[in-house]
Amino acid sequence: MLHVTLRNARPHESAAVEERLVASGRFIKRIRNPDNEVMLAKVGAGEVAAVTALLEAMPGVERVVDIKSRYVLSARAAVADRTVVRITDELSIGGTEVVVIGGPCSVESHEQTSSVALAVKSAGARALRGGAFKPRTSPFSFQGLEEDGLDILERVRSETGLPVVSELMSVRKLEAMDRAVDVIQIGMRNALNYPLLKEVGALASRRPVLLKCGIGTSLEEFLCAADYVLAEGNPNVILCLRGTVGISQESRCSMNIVDVSALRRMTHLPIVVDPSHVAGRWEFVPSVAAAALVAGADGLLVEVHDHPEDALSDAEQSLKPERFHQMMHRLRLLAPVLGRTVAECETPVCVPDGHPLEELCLEAPPKNGEPRAARHGHAGPARLVAGA
Ligand code: PEP
Ligand code: MN
């Protein structure tokens, strides 16, 4: 597929490029992005070189590439530089900083959301996650506070200054969500819901979209799904790997760490990893987070709850705030080795004694009969890391 980028093209220049493409093969689509225009066309293999040369000489044309993969707009070759998605004036994802988004699985109350938000912020999280509309396996499980949950997220955003990420499941809630949140999450269950992807792509706000990979979805299908959003003129797509079925009965999902590196080669879009849904158990979350960082993730989406044992969803995988704080401390130590940064924390962190990287790893396994809740809180002697 021929991918033609136009920049600052005047209407008659765009029209001339479109005419040329129509004459040279099968014209597929014209995409008007906020700061450029893209045209796609299928051209016979024997004519690609000649048509490319003609197009490159036309005014307004910035770049012409022949993309061989099924995913086109998300393909690495489609743009010269990796995409950095701007979330707010202060926060972008896809640059040197590894952006950590922390918060509860579900918004349960103002008090709970606000206290978790303040805790993750003080540990260096740059955005708040929290589901108001929850996709639950059983229809009898907590389904989220819905619009009331969005009101709480808006309130907590104004109290903390943290941008908010929350999941959209139905096009009927599109406008409410667009008003209330900074990033629209499309969950694993809707990863291939093409009408929904087109609608978030067509939002006039070009609201950033955090698109999760579905269970059993190939990376190729995942990037084709991202193309559905991009094809509507919303270039602000953030990819999120959250694991898929695997061989372990100890964790909820498995994630091939190579997928992060592979995606970095396949696409220019920023990549986030959700270690909480991969792990399914809070004990595994820090090591998955560290592995994701090493493999090249641009961000992490992490579930945190101040009383995980009482959480209305995903209790087993939610970190307590102090655990999250400790994990952030270790990720901050790891990041410079990888040429990355993690935002500073606002309060000193209390870490158990031991080697920092060792502490990224797992707790001792539970003893038989020991209640899980009793193992929250940190084990062994602790020390304060001043100004960490
Ligand atoms: C979530 O983020 O809480 C969630 C439901 O995620 P997923 O769609 O990955 O299951
Ligand atoms: Mn969850």
Image (cartoon, rainbow, N blue to C red):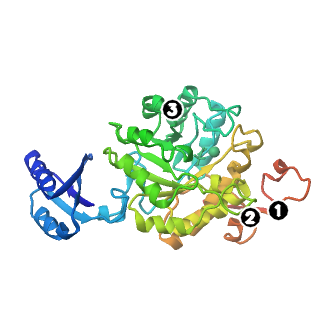
Query: Where's residue 342, x and y in %?
Result: 52, 60
> Which numbered marker is on residue 285?
none
Q: In the image, is 158 to the left or to the right of 323? A: left
Quick check: marks 1 and 3 in contact, CB under 8 Å? no
Q: CA distance from mark 3 to mark 2?
A: 35 Å
What's the residue at 13%, 50% (across, down)?
14
Q: Which residue is mark 3?
A: 154
Query: Where's residue 223, x and y in %?
Result: 43, 56
The 10 Å Cα crowd at callout 2, few under 14, some 14 to 19, many 20 or more, is few
What's the residue at 61%, 58% (across, down)?
328
User: Secondary structure beneath disc 1?
Assistant: loop
Q: CA distance from mark 1 to mark 3?
A: 39 Å
Q: Is mark 3 within 8 Å of ligand 1?
A: no
Query: Where's residue 260, x and y in %?
Result: 51, 65
Does residue 360 show up?
yes
Q: Nearer the viewer, residue 363 or 339?
A: 363
User: Secondary structure beneath disc 3?
Assistant: helix
Quarter of the image with the C terminus is bottom right
- Please, what is the three-letter code of the amino acid marked with disc 1? Pro
> Depth-wise, is mark 1 or mark 3 nearer the camera?
1
Quick check: marks 1 and 2 in contact, CB under 8 Å? yes
- Please, what is the three-letter code of the amino acid marked with disc 3? Glu
Q: In the image, is 1 to the left or to the right of 140? A: left
- Looking at the image, tell me whether mark 1 or mark 3 is earlier in sequence order: 3
Q: Quadrant of residue 264?
A: bottom left
The 10 Å Cα crowd at callout 3, few under 14, some 14 to 19, many 20 or more, is some
Q: CA distance from mark 1 to mark 2?
A: 8 Å
Q: Is residue 110 above or below residue 193?
A: above
Q: Which residue is mark 1?
A: 365
Query: Where's residue 152, x and y in %?
Result: 56, 30
Q: Nearer the viewer, residue 66 or 84?
A: 66
Determine the residue located farthest toward the top in the rendered image: 148
